[in-house]
Image: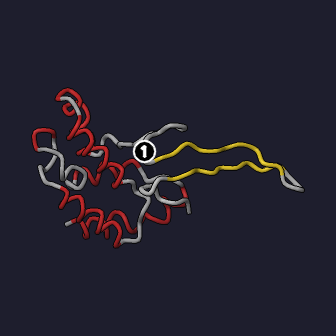
Amino acid sequence: MTNRFFADELSPNIERWVDQGIVDREFWHTAGQAGIMGGAIPEEHGGAGGDMGFESVVIYEQTRTGDCGWGYGIQSIVTHYITAYGTDEQKARWLPGLASGEIVGAIAMTEPGTGPIFKPSKRGPRRTATSTRSTDQKSSSPMARPPI
């Protein structure tokens, strides 16, 4: 089911979404209607009640298309945080919309002092012989992915 959905709905749009810098909002709704968004969300909150196996299949199938920009991985992290640590009120408020694609989850962090994975940045102007450049040197922990 997931590979067919991605073949029909994701793959034909990847290049356009890259060019416009954002995935169409309607795609999130369509993915929710197809049951892709809420696989690991409990049934009482609008999901399928599955586990990380469902999430793994969705991410695997997304990767097979060559897409890495949809944002499903972040959505999955957000739903798991709310499921594990949210109050009953927070779960009732957020999980149904995350499962339907009505709500798009995000993770926001600020610097400096964002926690154990992200270390403070050392930012500021740096003079060279011909110009002044901005520096963005982050020191990373062993868990942080190095900048590309």
Residue 84 sits in which quadrant? top left
Q: Position of residue 23 (x, y in %)?
A: 44, 53
Please give the name of the residue rendered at 25% of the width and 38% of the height, measured from the top-left corner: 82
User: Is residue 52 left or right of 133 when viewed as pictured?
Assistant: left
Q: Secondary structure at mark 1?
A: loop
Residue at 38% in and 68% down? 11
Considering every residue shown, the one lying at the far front of the view is: 142
Reply above or below: 13 against 89: below
Circle 1: residue type: Pro
Looking at the rendered structure, the number of numbered marks drawn on it comes to 1
Q: Residue at x 39, y 53 (%)?
A: 71
What colouring method underlies this structural image?
Answer: secondary structure
Residue 3 location (% of width, % of height): 25, 70
Viewer-nearest residue: 110 or 47 = 110
Q: Is residue 85 above or below residue 3?
A: above
Image position of 131 with respect to 81: above or below: below
Up the image or down, 45 lies above or below 9; here it is above
Residue appearing at x 84%, y 54% in the figure: 128
Place of residue 120 in the rendered image (x, y in percent of width and height, measured from the top left): 55, 42
Give the x, y percent position of residue 62. Answer: 33, 66
Q: Is residue 123 left or right of residue 24?
A: right
Task: Quadrant for residue 92, please give it.
Answer: top left
Where, quadrant-wise, is the N terminus in this rendering? bottom left
Q: Which residue is mark 1?
A: 116
Q: Is residue 144 left or right of residue 54?
A: right
The quadrant the C terminus occupies is bottom right
Q: Is 116 left, or right, of 103 in this rendering?
A: right
How busy is the neighbourhood of tag 1: few (under 14 within 10 Å), some, or many (20 plus)? few
